[in-house]
Image: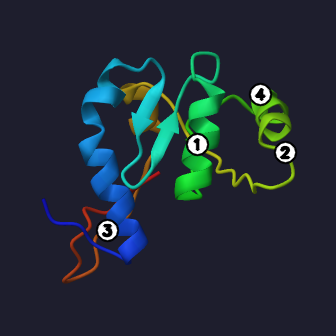
Amino acid sequence: MNYYGTEKQQRLQRQCDEAQAVIAVTPGLVQAGRFFCVDDIDRIDWAFVEDRLASDGVFGFRMVPTTRMGEIHEKLGPSYRLDLWSVFSADRDTAIAKTIVFPASPGSFASGRMG
């Protein structure tokens, strides 16, 4: 396996790869590429989250409803920053209906689809 980025980024990628067996049997735990992530905050062991934050400095909370953000802020406390992104989630037909098709620029690798 090839790893890219800084030494820390490569270490995080490697440890996620090495933890695939644990991730596969841990409800709610997800490999987010370079760090551990959870997509069900009701099923995760918060001690695990705290351990990962202490050793890695990063942990992800994927697709958590905005109504639950306060709980995460409270659990993490003031020592950690919580970055948020707005995401679009839909079934295939809805997603296709909402996309805007742009012509590809000459020499571009993009198909021109954007949503």
- Mark 2 or 4: in front is 2
Q: Give left or right: position of 69 versus 31.
A: right
Query: What residue do we see at 34% from left, 75% from top?
Result: 5
User: Which residue is rendered at x = 39% and y = 55% of the image?
Assistant: 34
Residue type indicated by callout 1: Asp
> Looking at the rendered structure, which numbered label has been put on residue 51?
1
- Colouring: rainbow
Horizontal and vertical percent position of residue 36: 46, 43
Say above or below: 40 vs 110: above
Label 3 and label 2: CA atoms lie apart by 47 Å
In primary-sequence order, the first of circles 1 and 3 is 1
Say which of marks 1 and 3 sits in front: 1
Q: Is 33 placed above or below 64 here?
A: below
In the image, 115: left or right of 63?
left
| Dot 2 and dot 4 residues touching (CB under 8 Å) | no
- Res 63 seen here: no
**Is disc 4 placed on a helix, strand or loop?**
helix
- In the image, what residue occupies the spot 80% across and 27% down? 67
Nearest to N terminus: mark 4 or mark 3: 4
Residue located beneath label 2 in the image: 77
Q: Name the mark nearer the viewer: 3 or 2.
A: 2
